[in-house]
Amino acid sequence: MKSIILKSVLVLCVATGAFAQTEIIKKNPEQQTESQQSENVIAKQKTEIRQVIIETKAEPVREINFEVKVGMTVPNTVKRLPLPPGIVKIVPRYADYEYFVPADGRIVIVDPNSLEIVLVIE
């Protein structure tokens, strides 16, 4: 009986700790993952970002032989351009990031250090 009670208390402590951590992530933007931050950018600033990129009239990348989604690595052969200053004003953490536009018109923002896609705007 004592063993069952101890196991129940242990499970409760672990579950409560995980729940508390989840709540902290939701409330504290600094602790959000890149994916969660990308969702926030899409929700709040996608129209502004799209407008700035359209104005640059970047030449589309025609041959893409990889999946274009957040978290994927872009081959080094894909021509990327530095993000325009207007984007950095909208999303300062993208200061040194790059982008490319596939032929389908999406906007793909890439971390230049890891070549990881951090944002795709449809």
Image (cartoon, rainbow, N blue to C red):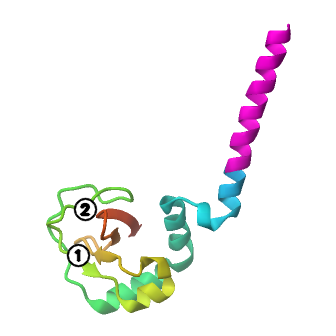
Residue that badge 2 annotates? 74
Membership of 7 in magenta stretch: yes
Picture layout, residue 37 above or below residue 47 = above
Amino acid type of disc 1?
Arg
Q: Is residue 52 left or right of residue 98?
A: right
The location of residue 24, given as percent across then percent down, is 70, 56
Q: How many marks?
A: 2
Mark earlier in primary sequence (1, 2): 2
Which region of the structure is painted magenta? 1-21
Q: Nearer the viewer, residue 104 or 8?
A: 8
Amino acid type of disc 2?
Val
The location of residue 74, given as percent across then percent down, is 25, 62
The location of residue 121, given as percent across then percent down, is 40, 71
Q: Quadrant of the N terminus?
A: top right
Q: Is residue 117 left or right of residue 11?
A: left
Residue that badge 1 annotates? 80
Picture layout, residue 110 above or below residue 24 = below
